[in-house]
Amino acid sequence: MGTDDGRGRGHGEWARHWQYEQLPGLDLLRAHYVRHTFPRHAHDGYVIAAVTGGIEEIGLPGGTVRAGPGSVVLINPEVAHTARAGVPEGWAYATLYSPRALIAEVAAEIATPRGTPGFNTDMVADPQGARAITEVHRAAEAGNALAADTLLRGVVARMLSRHAGPLPARPVRGAGAADAERARAVLEERMAAPPSLEQLAAELGTSPFALLRAFRERYGMPPHTWLTDARVRRARRLLDAGTPPAEAAVTVGFTDQPHLNRHFTRIVGVPPGAYRRERAG
């Protein structure tokens, strides 16, 4: 198979990124990556991933985590991170990209501490939990809705009851943080034709260096990296709605479809064509 099907990536790499219609809002990724590296990015929802082979290196705000078989990686919404192979043979994993609503629903059912739940660790050694995550994938792939939903809620409850507490709020501290949030709003609004860093800083009444420092502190990445990630997120929503990749590319501000393909594949883990085909059933 060719690279665009998401499975024949070369170097023994393959990936499937999809949704099971009976588990609305949940994204599933099962993959083996060798040379693929994920640049710094973040997710709208929660990441619950079971490493099933090799070693994954995850670059997080607190440092680099190395996860091997039997490990479960837990990442909260909007936490900037990278990922790459930690050994020459790469890594294999099964990932659940959970929407916030599901986490909140299960948290309410099991009476976790009040407030928005958040994981308080990046990785745990939990072979039983890791197996349960892979079983969610198997049940979904087999079209067994009852098993998939049951297993999914069991996994989420297990992780929340053992490794979660109230998600700490990110208070806006000082003018720099406020400028960073205003800058993000400008970039979201003018995604297809964004200002330069100097122009953006001038609009906000600050200096380029001060804005860059504040933005990095607030969002874990510089504005241009954040913008690329935001463009890919918006492109995903457009593809979900049936927009052709070439149209989605221009809409979010990429120069053409190959430009979208490159960044989309790096961040999502599969090419836009493979992603869209899975959505189309």
Image: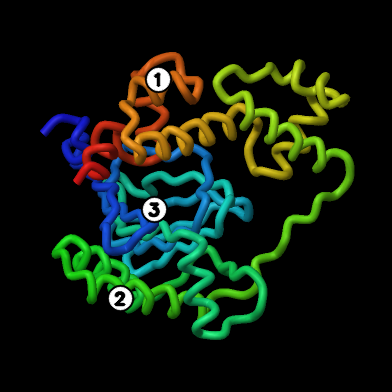
Query: As rendered, which of 34 and 198 lies closer to the eye?
Result: 198
Tag of residue 179: none
Q: Which residue is mark 2?
A: 151
- Residue 222 x, y percent position in the rendering: 65, 32
Tag 3 near tag 2, CB within 8 Å: no
Judge whether 214 appears above or below 197 on screen.
Answer: below
Q: Amino acid at mark 3?
A: Glu
**Residue drawn at point x = 20 percent, y = 31 percent:** 3
Tag of residue 259: 1
Query: As rendered, which of 67 and 246 lies closer to the eye?
Result: 246
Judge whether 126 appears above or below 190 on screen.
Answer: below
* Separation of marks 1 and 2 at Cα, in angstroms: 38 Å
* Separation of marks 3 and 1 at Cα, in angstroms: 27 Å
Q: Is residue 274 visible?
A: yes
Quarter location, residue 77: bottom right
**Left or right side of 14 for 58:** right
Q: Which residue is mark 3?
A: 56
Quarter location, residue 209: top right
